């Protein structure tokens, strides 16, 4: 909650500076265009919030006094140039690959593919929601590129007949683990708290989905059941 309030304060105090950076962002028009494919996605707001998160709030300690806050603002301003370059390198490429992946999935229909394609669409919708730039940890955003590549590889294998029928059972198992995660997250949301280990488990699920989908089996070391216990969520 403190970070949320601090983010809002920075957006107010540095409003002009932040807006100028986003207005003149290289590739901004392309981002706005591609972002329209994500329901409810406000590209301008998300980019501003991302800039604040990277320049001021990651991975700094929250200031506890007026003097610390003044220094905190100055240090964040110094980082803006570097952060803008990070955004330019990642976000347009991410949205471009998302558009290409959605196109491949949408044109890959056929008999017996409904379950697999539905899983791919569910995965894309869960990852690329209206607030994904704001809420996804920065390192995990880079894993999105690998996830998109993995989905296209699954399509290639599907088209070549390389996916086995037992993939359906693996997807059913994954759904069970996802429901467990969502229930725990809903409990934490009601309590207005969070659990870093639960967030870690959420990304374990993404890795599990990618690995088992390409191998047609679940590696024992990546079993969500085992990692659920290891994550300390129970």
Image: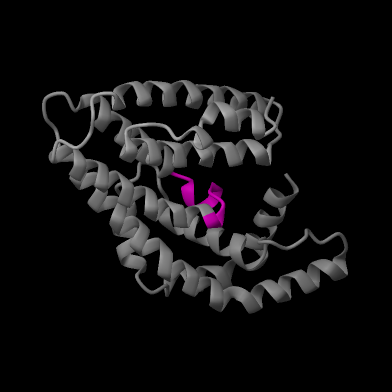
Q: Residue at x 55, y 26 (%)?
A: 225
Q: Position of residue 52 (x, y in %)?
A: 60, 62
User: Where is the N terminus found, in terms of image quarters?
Assistant: top right
Q: Which residues are magenta?
A: 129-139
Q: Nearer the viewer, residue 63 or 176?
A: 176
Q: Position of residue 70 (x, y in %)?
A: 79, 71
Q: Nearer the viewer, residue 119 or 91?
A: 119
Q: Position of residue 214 (x, y in %)?
A: 32, 40
Q: Nearer the viewer, residue 129 or 229?
A: 229
Residue 136 in the figure: left or right of residue 41:
right
Residue 35 in view (yes/no): yes
Residue 227 in the figure: left or right of residue 122:
right
Residue 209 in the figure: left or right of residue 79:
left
Residue 129 in view (yes/no): no
Q: Is residue 104 above or below residue 59?
A: above
Q: Residue at x 16, y 23 (%)?
A: 112
Q: Position of residue 111 (x, y in %)?
A: 11, 25
Q: Residue at x 75, y 49 (%)?
A: 2
Q: Residue at x 60, y 29 (%)?
A: 228
Q: Inspect the magenta stretch and tell me whether residue 4 lies in it.
A: no
Q: Inspect the magenta stretch and tell me whether residue 135 lies in it.
A: yes
């Amino acid at each position: 909650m403190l970070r949320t309030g601090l983010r809002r304060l920075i957006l107010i105090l540095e409003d002009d500076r932040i807006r100028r950076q986003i207005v003149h962002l290289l590739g901004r028009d392309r981002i706005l265009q591609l972002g329209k494919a994500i329901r409810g996605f406000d590209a301008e707001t998300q980019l501003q919030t991302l800039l604040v998160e990277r320049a001021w709030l990651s991975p700094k300690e929250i200031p506890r006094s007026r003097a610390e806050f003044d220094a905190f603002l100055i240090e964040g301003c110094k980082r803006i140039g570097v952060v803008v370059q990070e955004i330019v390198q990642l976000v347009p490429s991410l949205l471009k690959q998302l558009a290409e992946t959605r196109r491949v999935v949408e044109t890959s229909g056929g008999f017996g593919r409904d379950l697999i394609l539905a899983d791919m669409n569910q995965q894309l919708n869960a990852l690329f929601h209206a607030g994904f730039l704001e809420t996804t940890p920065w390192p995990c955003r880079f894993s999105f590129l690998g996830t998109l590549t993995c989905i296209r590889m699954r399509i290639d294998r599907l088209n070549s007949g390389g996916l086995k029928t037992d993939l359906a059972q693996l997807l059913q198992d994954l759904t069970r683990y996802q429901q467990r995660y969502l229930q725990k997250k809903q409990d934490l949301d009601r309590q207005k708290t969070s659990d870093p280990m639960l967030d870690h488990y959420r990304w374990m699920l993404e890795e599990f989905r990618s690995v088992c989908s390409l191998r047609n089996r679940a590696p024992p070391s990546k079993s969500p059941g085992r990692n659920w216990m290891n994550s300390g969520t129970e």
